Amino acid sequence: MLSESKNKAFIEFIKNSSKEEIIWMSGFLSGMIYSSGNLKKLRKFKEKITLVYGTETGNAKNLAFSIVRKAKNIDLQMNLISLDQYRLIDLKKENYFFIIISTHGEGEPPSSAKSFFNFIHQEEDLHLDNMKYSVLALGDRSYPFFCKAGENVDKRLHEVGASRLIPLHKCDVDYEEKAEEWFKNIFNFFEKEKFQEDIFKKNVKKKKIYGTILTNILLNDKERGSNKEIHHIEILIKNPEDVDYKPGDSMGIIAENPSEEVKKIMNHFQGKKDNDDIDISGSSNFLKKANIFNLSKNVLEKYSTLAKKDIPHDREWNLIDLLKSFPMKNRNQSKNLKEIVEILDPIKPRFYSISSSPRVHDSEIHITVSRHKFQINGNIRYGYCSDFLSKLKEGDILSFFIHKNYLFKLPESDKDIILIGPGTGIAPFRSFLYEREAMGASGRNWLFFGDQHFSSDFLYQTEIQNWKKNGVLYRVSLAFSRDQEEKIYVQNKIWENRKEFFTWIENGAYVYICGQKKPMSIDVENTIFRLIEEIGGTSPEFFIRKMKESGRYLKDVY
């Protein structure tokens, strides 16, 4: 409790402070309380996370405050400071450093950022090897030096040894979408990084979840000519109390290398033939979790040092091919194997939208997986994790973790929603619809779904038709692109229903888009912008910005 004199001074001080200054003070005081140990700390990392901004007109500042608020909502604590108040001597202490900076004049930084800008470019003995950074550049594409200041900062930090965490994002005057994408990339990095830290620590903080495969069903009909391979996988959770998820969340999975490939590597070191039996233990267990296919440039360079040979980078290298083509000179194979294990990258987790509902599918969790197929040098290849998942059989054990998606959630049950999810984009919407049905939600649901052929690629056809029949789905708009001479996609169906679509969003409906970013989400968004302009007679940029500010326009694209 403040004394009377302090309370009077405090109230007077608050009255004379701007909104932004009050927000800053709130964050500062919260940080002091968290650091004192009186409350649970939000920060998930011991390393420092700093967000700085350089602004002339106020856009970078407003954006920075907005990002810090969003970060706090998802338990990511950032230190926020203007570049004109930043202590340049602290640069070498930074672990994670994020910059929002605008460009003015002939590619110049704003006046508030000039000291910082000049320092990093003129300081000859500047080494920032411990820093991981990313730059969000604001500019105006109609000017010749578009985002030049941000480009220069990004380039210079990389030159002095800092590691570029997320590529430079350049924003035009309508910067909201690009800025949102930048922030989501930051958040997703820390979520993944936290998991990567945990799995290689002795004291694992993020608990792995184990489940048994109940069923693995191919949703496409190959006999009717489908050229896709999309699997519906149901998992029985071993300990249901370990699982806490909501519709919109994802499942994180680290694929395991095939045992036969690991055996080939182990046999190479033990001088055995590929068909000899060998125990999968010790180093071989690690090799099941290490990336042994399509080795990174970093791994190839480290191996080149070990083998004392130049490795050509003009092809894709798998570990076993590398070992056979450029054998290591050391006769101590145990030492060779240990050194190989130390240089390999871990397999990164892949994320799949959960397609089940926690209210409906008790003790189970479902995912929808497209087995990714592509060609390299004329050879057919499959996606690392999707291939692993597609081969799982009933009774197999799978470990995974829950990846929270705080930016893709259902609204209140009385709100109308429009779901746009062709292909595997249907996955989270299956979860949404089961959840809304179980809740008895009064809000209307409108689904846009599409794929190549009605007869062979209509994913979850029976469920969708039942939802339409019993009223859970108010409307269903389908687009099967290859069933007629002229290709029809979901954006064509949106345009076909443009008047009703606009009426829905004008009256408060939420729009969700899930699936491939290119070209689907771009084409869909262009169509929505067009109908807002033509049917609504208003600025689509302004209309969508307002929807985003109220959380009514949400995307989960990949």
Image (cartoon, grey):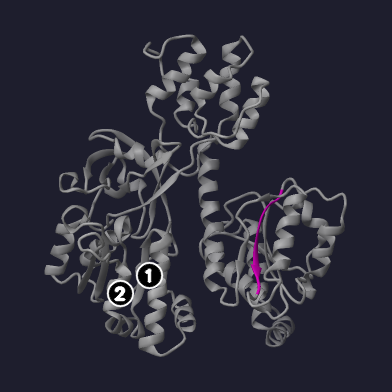
Drawn side of residue 208 relative to residue 103, left or right: left
Q: As shown in the figure, which amino acid type bears the numbered disc 2?
A: Ile
Place of residue 232 in the rendered image (x, y in percent of width and height, measured from the top left): 25, 47
Place of residue 58 in the rendered image (x, y in percent of width and height, measured from the top left): 68, 79
Element carrying mark 2 = helix
Along the line of sight, which residue is nearer the eye, 312 or 298? 312
Local crowd size for mark 2, using a 10 Å CA cut-off: few (<14), some (14–19), many (≥20)? many
- For the record, the magenta segment spans 131-139
Q: Say if residue 555 shows up in the picture.
A: yes
Residue positioned 29% across, 35% down in the render: 391
Place of residue 546 in the rendered image (x, y in percent of width and height, measured from the top left): 47, 81
Q: Is residue 533 above or below residue 197?
A: below
Q: Is residue 349 above or below residue 412?
A: above
Q: Say if residue 281 shows up in the picture.
A: no
Quarter of the C terminus within the rendering: bottom left
Give the image quarter of residue 18.
bottom right
Q: Earlier in the sequence, mark 1 or mark 2?
A: 2
Q: As shown in the figure, which amino acid type bears the numbered disc 1?
A: Val
Q: Are marks 1 and 2 in contact (CB under 8 Å)?
A: yes
Q: Is residue 53 above or below residue 37?
A: below
Residue beneath label 1, please? 524
Residue beneath label 2, please? 494
Q: Mostly what secondary structure, the magenta segment? A: strand
Residue positioned 23% across, 76% down in the render: 442
